[in-house]
Image (tube, coloured by chain):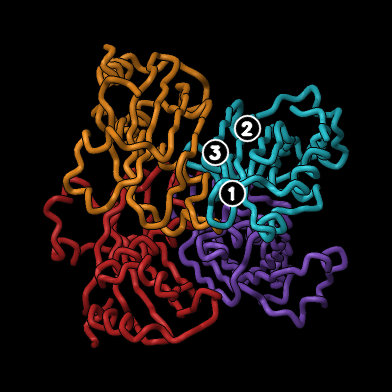
Chain colours: A orange, B purple, C red, D cyan
Amino acid sequence: MSTGTFCRLYYRIPFSETDAMKIVHHSNHAKYLERGRIEFLRLTGLDYVSIMKRGFHYPLVEIRTVFKKPLVFDEVILIETAIVEVSRARLDFAYKIYSVPELAMPSLSKEAFEGGKPSVLGETFHCCVNDEGRPVAADAEIVEQLKTLWGKA
Amino acid sequence: MSTGTFCRLYYRIPFSETDAMKIVHHSNHAKYLERGRIEFLRLTGLDYVSIMKRGFHYPLVEIRTVFKKPLVFDEVILIETAIVEVSRARLDFAYKIYSVPELAMPSLSKEAFEGGKPSVLGETFHCCVNDEGRPVAADAEIVEQLKTLWGKA
Amino acid sequence: MSTGTFCRLYYRIPFSETDAMKIVHHSNHAKYLERGRIEFLRLTGLDYVSIMKRGFHYPLVEIRTVFKKPLVFDEVILIETAIVEVSRARLDFAYKIYSVPELAMPSLSKEAFEGGKPSVLGETFHCCVNDEGRPVAADAEIVEQLKTLWGKA
Amino acid sequence: MSTGTFCRLYYRIPFSETDAMKIVHHSNHAKYLERGRIEFLRLTGLDYVSIMKRGFHYPLVEIRTVFKKPLVFDEVILIETAIVEVSRARLDFAYKIYSVPELAMPSLSKEAFEGGKPSVLGETFHCCVNDEGRPVAADAEIVEQLKTLWGKA
């Protein structure tokens, strides 16, 4: 994962996202990555609503998810999001999802997880399109802000 | 249910719509009603894509669902949709969902279900809005076609 | 809504729950009510996982939702949940969902919303079943704890 | 894609699976692959319900999806599923999703799509677990039936 800024989001698993195997259905993990990504972008001071208002969108061109350990109802997960590539043409993220022992939450520190193993690994690859869905070069200012977060500006 | 035209749609329950109680999660039933409604509208010769292209949308103002019998993975359901009210200001539907014994499907007749009991009952109430989401009177032609289907034109 | 205890849960709308009308798709509101209900139950000291471990489940027998104002991407909503009926045979909840002006959040007080209008109203009606899905009388202790919260014990 | 048997499933995109970009939200594609996979397994004469009744489950260990062209409301897609690997320890599938011009449907032949380009490519990787979620060797009979379909028995 990137050495730059990363974003940590906590999320409690709702019953609606479980399936008949009594674990989270795998179609929901893409939504967890999206929640992490949207919170990451908020850190830029350019939240996704603002990016869309400028006429830019970042649809997915590819997603990969590795499931190491099932997630279950009512547990709290930690979604860690980082940028792995940013240019005017593309934007790529990497994610780690951890199961969080609930009582540990108030005192969670970055160190607390260093020995921990992620339950889910994810990567998403995005292009930049305009309001009509056509590929365009992203706004240079947005790219600069993302690069700063990434630690490669 | 209306005495007019009604629409029958078969649908096989996917694993992704089950939950940890091993039944279909109740948030999915609204999607089943929507599938039935969209197919019903297609009967008008005015499918929902065409209605939207004319600048009209029918968002929900209310939904009610009664769960009589749980739906389960891989079963085939029959979604019956009928209009219960149509005017330039509103459009209301009623629905019955049946569990269908699979082998019976090829020879299903209306009569076959008359003794059957629905697993789910639903009602949806819609207003008509324009592209900006503001309430408007629906196109008179659309209303006439819906009334014809309803048997009250 | 009940005069007893009620539960307030904040939730940020993800992109995945929007639809092509650029509002939250109506199938998601049932999930919001469920999130509110699960948090309400946690207040009892008998969270839903514990209730299930005791062999009890509260599936829906009916749901009603009234949509007053569309919910949109990235807004923060407040889900208010209260009990309206509890016995050994059933458990009913009422809900109000408010759109929350984001900056107001830190200082939100009950009073702040008294003049506010809910965007969504909901009611859910539940029966009590055992692990096999058969209707049973709920554990008396669970019922007492719920009645206490409800203010009718 | 495999030279063995493959399964073709048609599916009409519902409104509930679109998002505010007016395309299918990317979390739904995993559900489309699952629909294709479940239909493929039905070809074995060992549908997934039967496999589960024997005490075996095939959860995902990894999923990859490449989005070439957005899917939109009400279009009909063709989901093609094939096996790429099967052993007692694992089961891997590859998928192609095509947008289907609706009028062409009745006369669709394999050849008709050979010049067509898939809108979505997918791969899923599964392990075999028992009812407790622990990795186990799959039933030899199930594996043989899958290998026969795969054309590598």
Measure the C-alpha gap from mark 1 to mark 3: 11 Å
Mark 1 crowdedness (10 Å alpha carbons): few <14, some 14-19, many ≥20: some
- In the rendering, at what x and y percent does residue A120 appear? 43, 38
Q: What residue is shown with label 2?
A: D123
At 31% across and 66% down in the image, what residue appears?
Answer: C96
Residue matched to label 1: D129
Specify the farthest residue to the top. A153
Residue type indicated by callout 2:
Glu
Task: Name the chain letter of the residue that bears numbered label 2.
Answer: D
Tag 1: amino acid = Val
Report the residue at 30% width, 16% height from top. Answer: A147
The alpha-carbon separation of the residues under discs 2 and 1 comes to: 19 Å
Which circle's residue, 2 or 1, is located before the other in the chain? 2
Labels 2, 3: front one: 3
Image mark 3: chain? D
State whether discs 2 and 3 lie on one chain: yes
| B133 horizontally vs B96: left or right | left
Image position of A146 with respect to C82: above or below: above
In this rendering, is residue D135 above or below C7? above
Give the numbered dot on residue D61. Answer: 3
Q: Residue at x 29, y 34 (%)?
A: A115
Residue D69 position within the rendered picture, expressed as x and y whole percent measured from the top left? 61, 28
Q: Chain of mark 1?
A: D
The mark that comes first in sequence, 2 or 3, is: 3
Measured from the top left, where is residue B132 in percent x and y? 44, 45
Q: CA distance from mark 2 to mark 3?
A: 11 Å
Callout 3: SS: strand
Camera sees residue C127? yes
What amino acid is found at the position of numbered circle 3 in the picture? Val
